[in-house]
Image (spheres, rainbow, N blue to C red):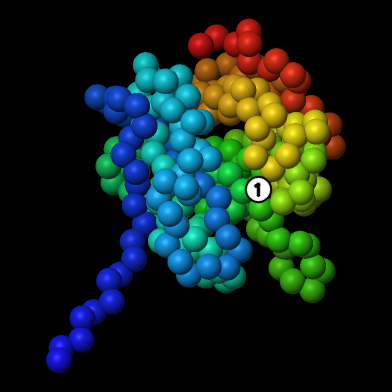
């Protein structure tokens, strides 16, 4: 009996969220969370639910500028050590965006383990900005190589983390941001006071902050004053910027 070849797993981009513009001038790639170790396939609906609401908001905000917004569907649920599957899939997705749309700027926007993938793959030549929300980062070990940051040079980087996050340690994202700031002045980090891992308590403010950052990074819109201040402030001020309740209510839509 002939043996059937095992199908090769491939990452893919989901359908564009919202009406796809006729002429694309910028791309957001949404990177969902994942597990530290897992060879299983992600569940398409469950895995992407956490980033789809943000994606729809960004698609609406960038429609006139020609923004295409896609969720990245990973090959595996896990990061899987040195394989770094999620980061590799993020890099593939940036390649795919260039193949589809040409030489346009790309923003990697990730949550949880997707935040780590966005930061790790941020060195892709098409990427001009990285948004990492509640990023999962490994414990720092003096005997091991720290999470890299040099690839973020020349990119605008925003990290957002809840102070009561019990799944991903906000102190680890602060330390990474501090190291990244030494190589790249365009790094800032906002703290969402008393919010947890899913950033649900202040979701409206977090999404408004993400919109403000992404539209400014991709299309040159003016950043809000808090984002400008955070990017300009020296550490630790610009890396522990509090996200104010009600942020975004007065921002231009």
Nearer to us in this view, 80 or 28: 80
Q: Horizontal placement of 246 versus 7: left or right? A: right
User: Secondary structure under badge 1?
Assistant: loop
The quarter holding residue 178 reads top right
Q: Position of residue 15 (x, y in %)?
A: 31, 39
Vertical order, 89 against 217 (above or below)? below
Vertical order, 35 against 170 (above or below)? below
- Reading the image, the residue beneath label 1 is 135
For image coordinates 65% across by 32% down, the residue present is 200
Q: Position of residue 78 (x, y in %)?
A: 53, 63
Which residue is the extreme one toward the bottom?
Answer: 1
Vertical order, 234 against 96 (above or below)? above
Nearer to us in this view, 60 or 108: 60
Nearer to us in this view, 220 or 78: 78
Q: Horizontal placement of 18 versus 120: left or right? A: left
Q: Is residue 134 visible?
A: yes
């Amino acid at each position: 009996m002939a043996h059937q070849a095992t199908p090769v797993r491939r990452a893919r981009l989901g359908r564009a969220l919202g009406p796809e513009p006729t002429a694309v001038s910028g791309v957001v790639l949404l990177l969902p969370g994942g597990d530290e170790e897992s060879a299983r396939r992600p569940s398409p609906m469950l895995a992407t639910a956490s980033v789809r609401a943000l994606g729809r908001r960004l698609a609406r905000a960038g429609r006139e500028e020609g923004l295409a917004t896609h969720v990245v569907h990973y090959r595996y649920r896990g990061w899987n050590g040195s394989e770094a599957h999620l980061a590799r899939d993020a890099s593939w997705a940036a390649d795919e965006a260039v193949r589809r749309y040409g030489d346009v700027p790309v923003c990697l926007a990730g949550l949880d383990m997707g935040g780590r993938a966005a930061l790790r793959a941020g060195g892709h030549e098409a990427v001009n900005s990285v948004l990492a929300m509640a990023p999962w980062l490994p414990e720092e070990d003096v005997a091991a190589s720290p999470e890299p940051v040099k690839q973020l040079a020349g990119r605008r980087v925003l990290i957002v983390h809840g102070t009561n996050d019990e799944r991903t340690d906000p102190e680890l994202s602060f330390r990474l941001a501090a190291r990244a700031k030494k190589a790249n002045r365009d790094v800032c980090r906002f703290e969402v006071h008393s919010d947890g891992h899913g950033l649900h308590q202040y979701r409206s403010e977090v999404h408004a902050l993400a919109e403000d950052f992404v539209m400014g990074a991709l299309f040159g819109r003016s950043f809000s004053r808090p984002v400008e201040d955070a990017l300009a402030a020296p550490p630790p001020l610009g890396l522990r910027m509090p996200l104010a309740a009600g942020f975004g209510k007065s921002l231009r839509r």
